[in-house]
Image (cartoon, rainbow, N blue to C red):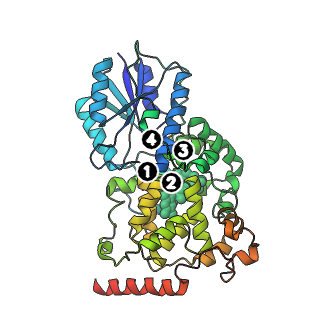
Amino acid sequence: TPSIVWLRRDLRLADQAAFAAAAAAGPVIPVYVLDDETPRHRRMGAASRWWLHHSLASLDADLRARGSRLILRRGRCEEVLAHLARETGATAVHCLRHYEPWWRNAERAVGEVLDLRRHDGNYLAPPGSVTTGSGSPYKIYTPFWRALEARMPPAPPLPAPDRLPAPEAWPASDTLAEWNLLPTTPDWAGGMRAEWTPGEAGAAARLEAFLPRARVYADRRNLPSVPGTSRLSPHLHFGEISPATIWHATAERGGTVGTFLGELGWRDYAQNVILQMPDYAGKPAREAFDDFPWRDDPAGLKAWQQGLTGYPIVDAGMRELWTTGWMHNRVRMIAASFLIKHLLIDWREGERWFWDTLVDADYGSNAVNWQWSAGTGVDSNMFVRIMAPLTQSPKFDAGAYIRQWVPELAHLDDTRIHDPDVRPRGYPARFVGHAEARARALAAYAEWNDRR
Ligand code: FAD
């Protein structure tokens, strides 16, 4: 009898334990269920849907090259999978574990009606398994990473199967086109098509391109003007490459790569946090922040979203995000700090914007980093530490980056581009002055702190 492989954010064939286990047992029916209905399901953002479309197309092509294919269905996971099992006579359903609250709900529901076999492999270590001596989960990154690192290396990656045994007849499938995952008018995805190749082959190519640079990662990762980081984040989010594959490749061929592996550790850490606090994207971990006096400022929010704040590095980042669906990590930190401290806008507004516009939008990583930036998280920066965007840009040598993304400033050289008083016509005036914004944030914080 055939088995079903239920795919979600694990759209790959190599090092994919669900495929390996199902293929060992007999014919395999790979299915992706577009589910906007499971309780607490967070609908994927627009940039993620664009990525998903291409990633599913790529996986289907890879499956067809192995005598298989991808079945597409829509609806609530447990209903769709139960129906598919009846149609095909499949008994077991194999999947990788996921930790978003809605995926945990869906796994519970599927497990109640079918023989669900869950496998690990999307993280360096299964989230929840890295615990203190007394068996409790870590709240803070540094001790978490120390404990995780002590368990490395991860198991060597499983090879991709050469062929996947097919069922006698294929069940019906939706077409990708009818899911309408791509933008219609306007087509805002041109910058994404230019930057990315979703799918397993695109992920492998990113890793190959990164390996020769891995040894200089620690020196370059904070410089947005040079290719310093791996840009593997959307591939990792959609599971087109496993962290174990990245770990082994960089450890063998990359040289001294501890800093880079520590960043992969942040990805594991974020899942560890949402496992303990499933509402992390909606609720400050430091509950006192529930009544922080955030400002209601639609004009400020809009200027930030559109990259029109008058702060070059913030605007460059927000425009890079809008165009490519990705933003450099250092600039994400600066842009997040600007929204929260300079504009005093609730971090959840930023979280939602990133959720909609990032191709690597990830429930855990996004929420953990936003709460970190806001100072509201379990493991946080302090609210009163306010980044000065104008100081950050020369410090991280962001001239070329700003020239690339803010055409109004493209004619300025490095000495003038960092000068806050050189502002050509056509480039917006600063939405709020730095000193004024800083004083306002500190006053709001002090007032709130006194009330507590
Ligand atoms: P590299 O530097 O090459 O790192 C390798 C991998 O490690 C990344 O691909 C990513 O999977 C992981 N990683 C690196 N830094 C972090 C981190 N701080 N937290 C968690 N994982 C990390 N990352 C996301 O994947 N999805 C998000 O939705 C997301 N939202 C963010 C929001 C804010 C406000 C901030 C400050 C950061 C956010 N990050 C998020 C983390 C980080 O910015 C990106 O993971 C990184 O920029 C991706 O680029 P890269 O693949 O070149 O990273």
Q: Return the residue at label 2.
A: 358
- The x, y position of residue 207, in whole percent, is 63, 44
CB of mark 3 within 8 Å of CB of mark 4?
Answer: no
What element does badge 3 sit on?
helix
Name, please, the residue furthest toward the front.
Answer: 185
Specify few, some or many for label 2: CA neighbours under 10 Å numbering under 14, 14-19, or 20 or more. Answer: many
Q: Return the residue at label 1.
A: 45
Disc on the earlier residue, 1 or 4:
4
CB of mark 1 within 8 Å of CB of mark 2?
Answer: yes
Tell me if the residue at label 2 has its CB under 8 Å from ligand 1: yes
Type of amino acid under label 4: Arg
Does residue 85 sit above or below 155 in this rendering?
Answer: above
What element does badge 4 sit on?
loop
- The x, y position of residue 338, in whole percent, is 51, 73
What element does badge 2 sit on?
loop
Q: Is residue 386 left or right of residue 179?
A: right
The numbered disc on residue 9 is 4
User: Dividing the image into 4 quarters, which one contains the C terminus?
Assistant: bottom left
Type of amino acid under label 2: Leu
The residues bearing labels 3 and 4 have C-alpha atoms spaced at a distance of 10 Å
